[in-house]
Image (spheres, rainbow, N blue to C red):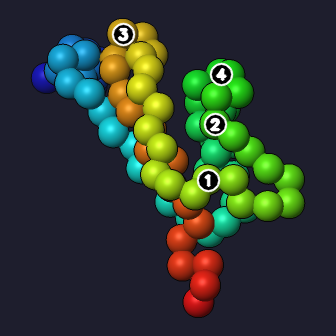
Amino acid sequence: MTVINTLQNLISTSQRKNLNFLLVGRTGVGKSSTVNSVLGRDIAEVGDYEATTMDVTSFHTKINDIPFTIFDTPGLCDDL
């Protein structure tokens, strides 16, 4: 099987499934900004100087007919 055939099979299979992406990291590293960038619109609240994401938030969308969910999370272990 060629690389092209393998990729076509993966894409075909992916179109029937919902892909999930979990964004984790310290406060202020750009997790919510990444959500906005991937989705191409300002949908996740972002802040310049204070944390804005206090709970896990999910964003559902499709790109090229492939459904996926991005989970934006609060800062990771910031109290350590």
Residue for badge 1: 53
Residue type, numbered disc 3: Asp
Q: Viewer-nearest of labels 1 and 4?
A: 1
Question: Do tag 2 and tag 1 residues touch (Cβ < 8 Å)?
Answer: yes
> Extreme bottom residue here?
80
34 in relation to 14, above or below: below
Label 3, residues with CA under 10 Å away: few <14, some 14-19, many ≥20 = few
Query: Secondary structure beneath disc 2?
Result: loop
60 in relation to 55, above or below: above
Tell whether 40 sits left or right of 8: right
Query: Secondary structure beneath disc 4?
Result: loop
Q: Earlier in the sequence, mark 1 or mark 4?
A: 4
Label 1, residues with CA under 10 Å away: few <14, some 14-19, many ≥20 = some
Residue for badge 4: 40
75 in relation to 3, above or below: below
Residue for badge 2: 44
Q: Position of residue 34 (x, y in %)?
A: 64, 41
Residue for badge 3: 65
Tell whether 47 sits left or right of 39: right
Q: Position of residue 1 (x, y in %)?
A: 13, 23
